[in-house]
Amino acid sequence: MNFATRSPRRTTLLALAVALTIALVAPAATPVALAGTSYQRISGEGSSWAANAIDAMRVNVSQFGITVDYNPSGSTAGRKNFLNGTVDFAASDIPFQFEPEDGSAPENPAPGSYAYIPVTAGGTAFMYNLQINGKRVTNLRLSGENVVKIFTGVITTWNDPAIQADNPGLVMPARAIVPVVRSDGSGSSAQFTQWMIAMFPSLWDDFCSRSGRAPACGFTSFYPTIAGMIAQSGDLGVAGYVSQGFAEGAIGYVNYSYALGSAFPVAKVLNAAGYYTEPTPENVAVSLLQARINTDESNPAVYLTQQLDGVYTDADPRSYQLSSYSYLIVPTKVAGQFNEDKGRTLGAFAYYAMCQAQQYSASLGYSPMPINLVEASFEQIRKIPGVEVQSVSIAECKNPTFSPDGSNVLAENAARPQECDRQGGQSQCPNGTGGLSNVPTAVSGPATNGGGQTPGAGTTPAGGSTPSAGSTPGGVTPGAGTTANGTPIAGGDLGTDGAPVIDPDNLNPGEVCDPDTGVCGVVGAPDDGGVTGGVVGAQSPTVLAQSSGWTSSIAMMLLVIGLTLGLVLVPAVVWRHLSRTEPA
Amino acid sequence: MALTTLPDLAAAEAPVPRELVARKGRGDRVFFGGASFSGLVVLATMVAVGVFLAIQAADALSATGLSFLTTAEWQPDRGQFGIASVMIGTVLIALVAVAIALPISMGTALFITEVAPQWLRSWLVALVDLMAAVPSVVYGLWGLFLLQGQLIGLSRWLNAWFGWIPFLDVARADPNSPLSSASVYTASAFIAGVVVAMMVMPISCVVMREVFSQVPMGEREGAFALGSTRWGMIRVVALPFGRGGIIGGTMLGLGRALGETIAVLLIISPRFDINFHLLEAGGNSVSSLIALRTFESSGFGLSALMAAGLTLFAVTLVVNFTASWFVARSRSGASSEA
């Protein structure tokens, strides 16, 4: 079939078809032509610890036409998929593991194909769900050793003398502790186990052997579990489990922001100075002054990575031991599906993340980056292929850590812990923590009688919050509500640290604190403008779940009933069966 | 005077059957070709999946050999891995799911075909189909955030009264203590099984409804004519006629339950020891293990996951083939195939 031999009619048809095709394709092709001015969509994956911060950035850059997809499936999955080339960038709490200490397969990125950008800082918090006489405890304190013992199954009940000693003002209940850990490969697990190994190596080694991991007992992204532990996927899974009504006695490790989002308290952890502290953005900033950042720019495999031993032993009374940085891992070479157009988007996103986003990260529960790391990150961003280099004036970033003299203002101005948070006192601070920082818990000195609690004393939420404090940037709004009986509900969380609670309505749909998952279900509607809290007193005292168990007389009774039924029914059934099959 | 002539009958005495030549038109040929092609594609896909899994799994399987079936641990990078615990977990979840889904789906199918008035019937059919169309992650979230809390009471009751039956025992649970943690009853194979049952139910129900609707009208009317009640008719006519469909539908559901991933992943707390205690926290399933670990593994670890997938593939295949065999062998199934 030669074109020349075609009939004129055919040729016309062909021309028509071509014209039609062009007409159809042309509109679709236009955006491609405009690609020079708009941003190509990019996707990232990784840390769920940093996910609340990254999600806020993601949402906020959309105003510039930048679309970033982020899947908080865990640091390990993020690094793996970055290596596989299925995502454009990864977020990870720990760097690539060239020589994993837990026996897992080594990760081998091509040298010089990636760079680390420290994107946010925060504390790994121990969020817990505990009530005493029907009132939620919000001021639990734990020494590091007790934290390790809880998460290694050595301490199994809340009234263990060691925990009681940490909490002289509380009468700890005889409830079982349910440690909730991560089931997926997680940077939080890695940071947590790294801290355990540094601080309490023998406890960790013992746990490692008991859980069948020995001899590969280095720090691990895959937390070993033993009977009695619950493993959940992602920070959201852990926070979701701990905040359920049935999970009383549970304690899990998540980023501080998740405790704020779930309106749940976190444990204050004892630091080297003898104070029990909470991972507030200020405390994290103080702690991370002691982090040793690798400054060997010639070795991109380690440049800007963190060494946290100094944080663990920091003698500042404000420090929180489990503070750490989380990183973006960005490609520095065009490869696979990553091209310069995507590099342009990634660069713009990274600039936003390092500059503007740091303004509001504290309101989410993260700690803003100090100036030296922001400057180093700007240099790292230049390595992304296709990036449009911006000359950012750092003062314009309005980063709360910056000051004209270069010191970290946030850390300098961080408040000293209260004296009642000091180890060895007669009692402890009643102030709430985490997402319930304005819900104090009644405390008593150890001298009072065993009754301990004075009902009602702790049920009035601190009036400290100012509900009309106005909206804060970054999709975070403090809110407050009032129940029918006039009891103020803890809404806006502007208590001790000035960090408002994350409004569930303004978060990414995946990150929403489900009103059914915890206290929210008890008080108020989910859409009353804020995370509802302050449930102290709203819940009935401990109910006898199963007052009568299995007794022998009941067993005998059931046995008799069963035998009688069997005696009556079995012959009849057998007879009928036989009589039916016989004729056949 | 013969006005008419009769045809000579003798001449046509040896009747030769007319030759039947089916001259397929273009449409017929296209359709035949298309249909057989699609059939072959299905077959080829199945074979390709099996071959792919086998090739990918070869590494891991050759490294462990038969101990792959008996090891409970899952640490492939250290050479200690096997499907003993995950396979048992998978089967337990699937059995719980089927045990719950079977009576519900059978009851629903019978209600739709035999009892419900016509206007309700179409509504129910649409609703059951809708249940089948709900994505499994929705079931998972529903199970995680709503059902789990509601089921704890049942788990606790079962454990308190029937804890002496070994697989209903819950370690660390103390029904007599008001301060005992409800967590020991959560994230269990039982709760995962209940959620999976909700996903299995519509599939089983559709098969059973199909079969019950084919019960011959004559037999049905006959039973009524002989004075049977509706229940009597269902018992002597519908149920025996639909036996193949009931078994087949149940086994199709079992096949789905074995492979259910995301709902199980969301609910269960993974553990890698052999755990027969249905109500106790922690369990595992092959598909949720694969979903959890695929993006965190590389090389050998991935091969180990493929080996687990291959095992699940084989088991599911056997279950589904058994199901279709039952359906085909039964009266109802045979009539529908003819």
Image (cartoon, coloured by chain):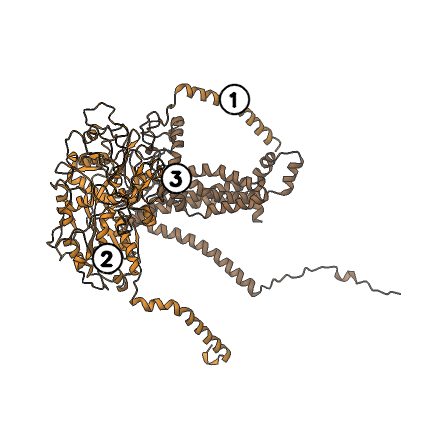
Q: Which secondary structure, mark 2?
A: helix
As displayed, is residue B292 above or below residue A387?
Answer: above
Q: Pinpoint the chain carrying mark 3.
A: B
Kindly tell me whether residue B126 is visible in this rendering.
yes
Please tell me in which quadrant of the rendered image residue A536 appears: top left
Q: Which mark is residue A352?
A: 2
Looking at marks 1 and 2 on the same chain, the residue that comes earlier in the sequence is marked by: 2
Residue pointed to by mark 1: A567
Query: Which chain did the image draw in orange?
Result: A
Please tell me in which quadrant of the rendered image residue B272 appears: top left
Residue contact at pointers 1 and 2, CB within 8 angstroms: no
Q: Colour of chain B?
A: brown
Q: Pinpoint the chain carrying mark 1.
A: A
- Counting the numbered discs, the total is 3
Image quarter in which the C terminus of chain A is found: top right
* CA distance for labels 1 and 2: 79 Å
